[in-house]
Image: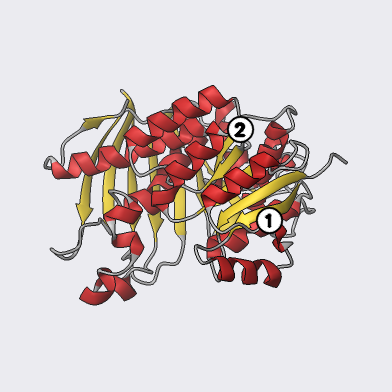
Amino acid sequence: MPKKIRLGILGGGGDSLIGILHRVASQINDNYEIVGAVFNPDHEASIAFAEQIDVPTNRIYKDFATLIEEELKLPEEERIQVCSVQTPNFLHFPMAKKLLDNGFHVICEKPMTMNYEEAKILEEAHQKSGKVFALTHTYTGYPMVRQMREMIKAGALGRIHKVDARYYQGWINTIIHDKEKRSSVWRLDPTKAGISSCMGDIGVHAFNLVEFATGLKINSLLCDFNYLYEDNQMDVDGTVLVRMDKHVKGVIRSSQVATGEENGLAIAIYGEKGAFRWEQERPNFLYKLSDTEPLQVYKPGHAYNSELSLSGTKLPPGHPEGIFDSMANIYLGAAKAIRGEKYNDGEFPTMTDGVRGMNFIESTVASHKKGNVWIDLD
């Protein structure tokens, strides 16, 4: 067994949902050991949290700058190898760039940066660093999403005709209708969340899933947002028409005010030979539709699945796997890359996906603000 990769964590303390997801995921395949962190801006709270989860406190630093400074003083065989950035959006870019500039690998939450310009700067820093950068578009780690990708790549659907992706949630309903609340939540504050709330937070996942599964790039889009209130600066609902090439069209629908919805990410891909349908809330079922054959259902763990799907499956058929396993598969792929081992290019989203995502987000905002017009992506 290779020696465990020394992992540092930025953010994700307290009752953070994303924090526990990352920590559990990093442990599932026994590849990482948390050796240092800044869990919280309050150093005492950070120390207390480290004690709570049984992480040694001697390398729980008071702030990010101190983490970099002190870790670089350590011998290379002792210092943090990779840092997981789990902070609010506005900190992703400065932290990721400084980590890369100082020779650390990076695993980063999305959106990767606050804007497209920052994404291009970070891409250049990444190229200069020679380090691994993994972006946690978690849903690409599901075995059945990976199976769909591999089957499409092998020609199972023939020419793609249409793509329909949606990501519906209802959680912001409890905030958006209260003027005081919507003025105090960081996800609705453009200085902390970036230029988009709904499309930047969840719509970009649907965008990423479309490009990941089909292997095609979205070339242009037309977007219409809903802000619900005049004083709200951030979109909470949006519909995006997309063109992938001359004969491939589609739609990406995203909402944080879809009343009663929980985590409704889903995708349907239609081609000349058949179609695939997958839903995140039922992740262990991949449906293959046809005009001439009965409905087929693919499930994880079976020998008929692709190598990429099976490499992300830890249990025998019939044992459900979920979002912790999906995130763990991204950490597993990053571990292979950090160690210089062979890996499939679908094992974790990369800097390229982050840059594409920011290009998508900015283009949706531009399309809406210009009166719902078509915008070309780079």
Label 1, on which residue? 59
230 left or right, relative to 304: left
x, y percent for residue 253: 33, 50
Q: Where residue 24 sits in the image (x, y, percent)? A: 68, 59
Quarter the N terminus occupies: top right
337 left or right, relative to 353:
right
Q: Residue at x 45, y 29 (%)?
A: 123
Q: CA distance from mark 2 to mark 1?
A: 18 Å
Return the disc, 2 or 1, that comes first in the chain's sequence. Answer: 1
Q: Nearer the viewer, mark 2 or mark 1?
A: 1
Asked whether, in this view, residue 350 is left or right of residue 227, the answer is right
Q: Quadrant of residue 333?
A: top right
Residue occupying image coordinates x 74% and y 54%: 28
- The x, y position of residue 144, in whole percent, is 62, 46
- Judging from the image, the colouring scheme is secondary structure
Identify the element where label 2 is drawn.
loop
Crowdedness near tag 1: few (<14), some (14–19) or many (≥20) residues, C-alpha within 10 Å: some
The image quadrant that residue 233 belongs to is bottom left
Between 346 and 130, the one nearer to me in the picture: 130
Quadrant for residue 73, please give it.
top right
Q: Which of the numbered marks, if any, corresponds to residue 103?
A: 2
Position of residue 49 relative to residue 137, above or below, is: below
State the SS at label 1. helix
Query: Which amino acid type is marked by label 1?
Result: Arg
The single residue placed furthest to the right in the displayed view is 1
Q: Are marks 2 and 1 in contact (CB under 8 Å)?
A: no
